[in-house]
Amino acid sequence: MTVYNRVALIGLGLIASSIAHAMRQHGLAGEITGHDVLPETRQVALDIGLVDRVFDSAAGAVEGADLVILCAPVGAMGDIAAEIGPHLAPGATVTDVGSVKQAVIEAVGPHLPAHVHFIPGHPLAGTEHSGPRSGFATLFINRWWLLTPLDGTDPAALARLRGFLETLGANVEEMDPHRHDLVLAVVSHTPHLIAYTMVGVADHLRRVTHEEVIKYSASGFRDFTRIAASDPTMWRDVFLTNKEATLDILGRFTEELFILQRAIRMGDGDQLFDYFTRTRAIRRGIIEAGQDTAAPDFGRAVQPPEKQGKG
Amino acid sequence: MTVYNRVALIGLGLIASSIAHAMRQHGLAGEITGHDVLPETRQVALDIGLVDRVFDSAAGAVEGADLVILCAPVGAMGDIAAEIGPHLAPGATVTDVGSVKQAVIEAVGPHLPAHVHFIPGHPLAGTEHSGPRSGFATLFINRWWLLTPLDGTDPAALARLRGFLETLGANVEEMDPHRHDLVLAVVSHTPHLIAYTMVGVADHLRRVTHEEVIKYSASGFRDFTRIAASDPTMWRDVFLTNKEATLDILGRFTEELFILQRAIRMGDGDQLFDYFTRTRAIRRGIIEAGQDTAAPDFGRAVQPPEKQGKG
């Protein structure tokens, strides 16, 4: 069921390699071409069969492609668009997987010729791993893939891309780009920044040795370290390009934190108890909505002993 | 291999029920007695066989026990100790599972007669679930169980308790109670408070509807909600009784957060990149130390589709 004759992947990390594996599994692309700025990544992508052909330049990779997927960090997308613009085939669809949408639209849009369909997108899927070897075909199954199409987008091009993404396993929804950036600031960007911060605090602490922080990390902290192990370039760009919404949510976070901090200082147990009771209800909502496992500790705690880490 | 003839569990939630299941599995106790303040919990504990006998009062449950384990929230332990003190058998060992150690020692110690061995403890194990039905026998396998024995603790009583806990599957270590409270403020208490706060922020936001926060929670936020679903009473007491260390670490956290917030506001990408690169190394240390799974997304992402939540 070939949907596109030639798909070009620009940037060959976790998301691109997962798309490649899933496209292969479902026979969605006649040919897969690719480009990455790192020569080593290009070689790996060729060696493990992610792409049929790899190009030293993004412009080379997009020649003749009817679908181009920009999988580079958000901060690199403007330059890539400027480079590939003149080389895009008439009628081609260009999409991206960036975690921020308004900045991508502003950076990419102006460089694309009128004869291509630009449909910005964002798969809410990923792991803390990165690079061309980290992808797997099932990454997008039952995950959201948000599209933020611009006014006047060709319905046929949109429907074709939707069908392609749904075959990868994703649940596709359309959303306004401004709203996307605000929602993601709440559910993803600010939590990531906070996790990075908490891990940084633990690292700086001199009174508690590094060894003890790692040794006893299972008591909550290790969940933060997983999030804080995500790709540094990607996240730098997310915060720089979704600045306004992230700072807004961070301000609210700090306000709330100070209220709880004060409750601790004043010994106000009732306030703490009420707060913790409300947050518990949200977890219940997420499990009822099928967005996470109800298994204790994400299922880690009930792993058989031989699969658990040795203390 | 009975290690204690009669073990009394005071408070019958996640930890006590897990201890009960593990004791049964290994035949560690001749008899298990129990008490909980909630009549319903007492009935469940009896119905599902956690305990052989259940008592309306803590004093009743400890009569004749040679091991008493206080599994109630930290804030309740002083009153429990006052109640059971006169009823403890000579030579009995009293331990607890509280997440804070200095406050427990201060609250419990004065009420215990000289003829019992008081050995405070803390298993670094748990899930976000609570109540008598949430326990399971493997909870402590390869988890740390920290003991903070007081000066002059009887070596034989300590060795006996150690052996018991090791048979439950735990890795037992001894630690100074002050140091325990500081380390736990870093690896557990402050991360929990932050997770509670972030979930609270999301709940308050009016511009982003509740539905959207839940719907798109998989992008990082849901990890926070798991932590923020933990028992509200337990956590209220943790923060009230480990106030000093938690406020210290919170202060450092806020400092760091403001530095990153400023870097975002000023567009200082290098600073963000360097920070995120350092925190990634800590995750690597935790995985190398066997304290967490290296599987992407805790192994959730590679679940077969039929086990995943439906979007």
Image (spheres, coloured by chain):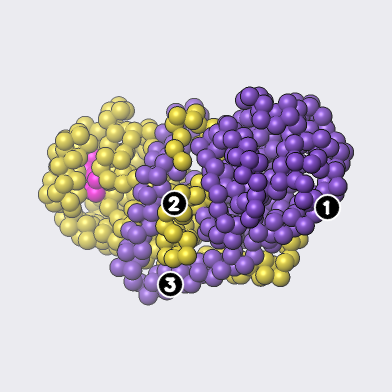
Chain colours: A yellow, B purple
Query: Which residue is under mark 3?
Result: B259
**Residue A58 percent location from the top left of the image:** 17, 51
Q: Main secondary structure of the magenta part?
A: strand
Other-residue count near label 2 (Cα within 10 Å), few / some / many at <14 / 14–19 / ≥20: many
Where's residue A206, x and y in %?
44, 65
Q: Are marks 1 and 3 on the same chain?
A: yes
Residue A215 in view in this figure: yes
Query: Magenta part of the protein: which range?
Result: A7-12
Quarter of the figure with residue B250: bottom right
In this rendering, is residue A208 above or below B141?
Answer: below
Q: Is residue B197 left or right of residue B293?
A: right
Amino acid type shown at disc 3: Ile
The answer to whether mark 1 and mark 3 are in CB contact below 8 A is: no
Q: Residue at x 77, y 46 (%)?
A: B115
Toward the viewer: B135 or B87? B87
Return the chain for callout 2. A
The reply to whether the C-beta atoms of the residues labelled 2 and 1 are less than 8 Å apart is: no
Q: Are marks 2 and 1 on the same chain?
A: no
